[in-house]
Amino acid sequence: MKNITPMLSLLVIKDIASKCGFDLCGVAKCQNFTTDRLFFDKWIDKGYAANLEYLKRNRDKRADASQLVEDAKSVIVCAVSYKNRYSTGYHSNCHQKIASYALTTDYHTTIKEMLRNLFSKLKQIYPTISGRIFVDSAPIFEKRYAVEAGLGWIGKQSLLITPQFGSFVLLGVAVITDECDQYDVPLKVKGCGECRRCIDACPNGAIKERHIDTRLCISRATIESEGSEQIPLHGWVFGCDECQSCCPYNTKTEFARNSLFTPTFDPAEIDWHKISEAEFSLHFATTPLSRSSLKRIEENLGSTYSL
């Protein structure tokens, strides 16, 4: 008698995701986001991607997850809150601000391990399950899948906003070849409404309502490979939280419950000019700061554009 592979249970997936440390989990059908692809193409054609060349590649894969995983049927989207006391904003006199997600172990490493754990536990129940996990490691519209999976909506600052944790969430996805017994649906919520605090708060005017002109974005300017233009950094030396700290949905939420996302250092207490390359590697090699360098941070710190 032919064995019939049971469909994945949505409730089982969510229960395991919670036990693996995720705050939210949803499952959406794999689909081709043609409308998002057209918007994305226009965004790039207008030059908004600046020098982020990786965004200009593999656009077909970004819109169609089945090109990443053959015969993909479902996309599991997991989110975890990382909000901490630095997420609410720095003192106005602080000129060495660091985005709050970067104050602990690199989330790419942490979330990938959490996803591996999730996949391993699912495989114990569904031995034939197959697929791949991604944490910013492949071209995929993960925020759109998060919306389809009922986790939240895309805010005016282009980030996913969740009712429970605001926009201070990090995402990981698993694209699998198995079908689920049921799928989540997008939330029916008011969303951002008429609020435009994030737009008004961006010191460089980079937010254009649900998309970003990265040529003006402080986060890009302080982290990614340098472009030809200089822009004001307003005291940020790595990343930027300006458009999030002001969001009403973020002011109401609690700090992260998962201890893996607790800050491991206080950026205001570090004298970047007095630490050596060896000390930088020792203390920050496992954090997102390793994506930059001590020299780059010192340049951002010392730039007249930071003040």
Image (cartoon, rainbow, N blue to C red):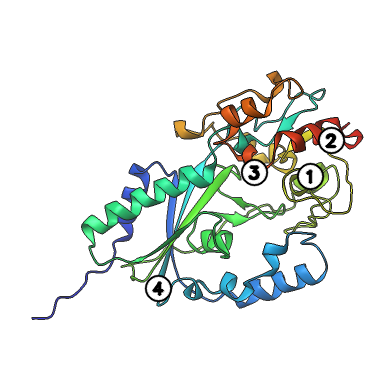
Q: Identify residue for label 3.
A: 291
In the rendered image, the vertical position of residue 169 relative to residue 47, given as above or below: above
Left of 151 or right of it: where is 87? right
Mark 3, mark 4: which one is toward the viewer?
3
Quadrant housing the C terminus: top right
The circle on residue 73 is: 4
Badge 4 or badge 2: first in the primary sequence: 4
Give residue 263's position: percent from left, percent from top.
Answer: 56, 28
Residue 255 placement (x, y as % from top left) = 54, 31
**Disc 4 versus disc 1: nearer the observer:** 1
Q: Which residue is mark 2?
A: 234
Depth check: give the residue in front, 282 or 245: 282
Callout 1: few (<14), some (14-19), or many (20+) C-alpha neighbours within 10 Å? many
Closer to the N terminus: mark 3 or mark 2?
2
Q: Are marks 3 and 4 in contact (CB under 8 Å)?
A: no
Q: Is label 1 in a helix, a strand or a loop?
A: helix
Horizontal side of 168 relative to 89 (left or right) equals: left
Residue 70, above or below 109: below
Instruction: Please tell me whether mark 2 sits on a helix, a strand or a loop.
Output: loop
Which residue, given by chain and number where applicable, does mark 1 sit on?
Answer: 218
Q: CA distance from mark 3 to mark 2?
A: 21 Å
Contact flag, marks 3 and 2 (Cβ < 8 Å) = no
Task: State the residue in front, 226 or 202.
Answer: 226
